[in-house]
Amino acid sequence: MQNEKRLTRQRTSADLITALVAATLLLATHSVAAAEGTIPRGEEIAVLTHAPEVPAPITRKYATKVVVHLEVKEVVKELAPGVQYNFWTFGGNVPGQFIRVREGDLVEFNLHNHPDNKMPHNIDLHAVSGQGGGAGASLTAPGHSSVFSFTAKNPGLYVYHCATAPVGMHIANGMYGLILVEPKAGLPKVDREFYVMQSDFYTKGRHGEEGLQAFDMEKAVEERPDYVVFNGSVGALLGDKALKAKVGETIRLFVGNGGPNMVSSFHVIGEIFDRVYGEGGLKVNQEQVQTTLIPSGGSTIVEFKVDVPATYILVDHSIFRAFNKGALGMLKVEGPENKNIYSGKQADLVYQPEGATIQTMPKDKAEVKAPAPAVALTRPELMKRGERVFTQVCSACHQADGKGIPHAFPPLAKSDFLMADKGRAINVLLHGLQGPVTVNGEKYDGIMPQLDLKDADIAGVLTYIRNSFGNSGDPESVEEVKSHRSEAE
């Protein structure tokens, strides 16, 4: 009996020693892990931003618990001038708000479905390792909230999107955004960061048809988008909404592609990407890149330094998407010129090879289609609409200041040709122009193609031009444009 008691005491002591050693080892392991920043400590509320803004870089050297609150809202907003659409959004805008966390962070995700919404929604974050990227844990009815957690294990730039059936419809209506998982060491320092996301939309009406447009499932299945845009709408990065920087600054663009269908050929006209982090990874896989592919549901990070002042144009270089469907943005860079890097035009010489002749493209009236009728607009409405049309359609040739390009595109600024005859100006926009014309004493001989503009667009842009760039004239009315269109038909 005494031997048994001694053995019991010895076993108890041994167990206690083993437990103490295990606890010591565990404490030491946790201490090392905490020192290395792999055990989350503390808690913070995530700062989310709307495109094109990006949350500030993370400066802490340890992992923490990050609480994310993201609200789903179904809202009617403008897709293009005069075109309304019922967007389904993360945060009230398309794309959804930008989320920035650090590698190793424990993310508590709170998805809120606004009570006024009609549909249940969820979220699939490509940064999540787990069932459905969080989709199964986050299916949320209107007026409810869902909560789940995940560890941000893998650094990179990831797309998130709704994955509620029918998944394609939810994505096509605007439910996508980006989450950046910064590496522990952080990203290289740059001067400016911007958030740009491409997507394609499918509407019952044709491109530019005004009014509230519904989603067209047939076009989506056949992959025939009416709009391909940056940051949720035509013109979201144009004019006063353009990205802005200064000469000498380094730029980082976080670029995503929500799809749901189109692959993006992302390019910035007038710049070269110094570094490209392909497919949203955090290793530079190419340098000195002109155009980079971004798959649907994918992303990329591009970095470059701006050396000279210019308006750099962001495009999907599947180029008709840019100039005809809306995938167009601007980065306006101000600062001193550097003639060694870019001189501008140094000479304008006559080039007339033997046998050359001016060629014209005849107009086939049978192919002319009248746009949908437009409602009457006030003068301020015409000016506002006209400025948008000018920026999107006219400024590439006639320049932002309306001064044109000598010997190539005639000036609109103080233009005697334009201001002399309102009816002629309408007909030029309705039917195009070919053959020699004289503007402010200089002869131009070229072709202006026929533009597929609505009556209200023509009235607006002519009103804007006739009252800008040193011009002063009566506004054009929608009825005047309709009258000229009817006479031609």
Image (spheres, rainbow, N blue to C red):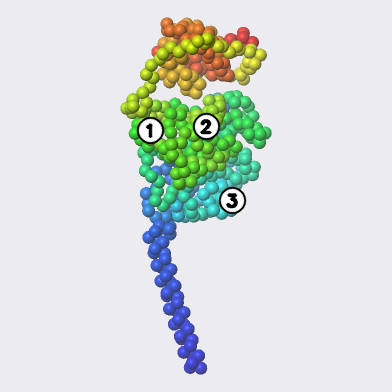
Please state which of the two labelled residues, at mark 3 or mark 1, is closer to the viewer: 1
488, 359: nearer the viewer? 359
* Residue 193 picture location, percent across and down: 41, 39
| Relative horizontal placement of residue 177, taking residue 288 as reference (left or right) | right
Using the numbered discs, state the Cα–Cα distance from disc 1 to disc 2 in whole angstroms: 20 Å
Please state which of the two labelled residues, at mark 2 or mark 3, is closer to the viewer: 2
Name the residue that disc number 3 marks. Answer: 132
Residue drawn where x is 43% and y is 29% of the image: 270
Name the residue that disc number 1 marks. Answer: 306
Q: Is residue 253 visible?
A: no
**Total marks placed:** 3
Q: Are marks 2 and 3 in contact (CB under 8 Å)?
A: no
Residue drawn where x is 66% and y is 14% of the image: 366
Number of residues whose C-alpha sits closer than 10 Å to that of mark 2, classed few (under 14), some (14–19) or many (20 or more): many
Amino acid on which the number 1 mark rests in the picture: Val
Indicate the secondary structure of the residue bearing disc 3. helix
| Relative horizontal placement of residue 172, taking residue 14 as reference (left or right) | right
- Label 1 vs 2, first from the N-terminus: 1
Number of residues whose C-alpha sits closer than 10 Å to that of mark 3, classed few (under 14), some (14–19) or many (20 or more): some
Name the residue that disc number 2 marks. Answer: 316
The answer to whether residue 158 is above or below residue 130 is above
Amino acid on which the number 3 mark rests in the picture: Gly
* Residue 482 picture location, percent across and down: 59, 13
276, 364: nearer the viewer? 276
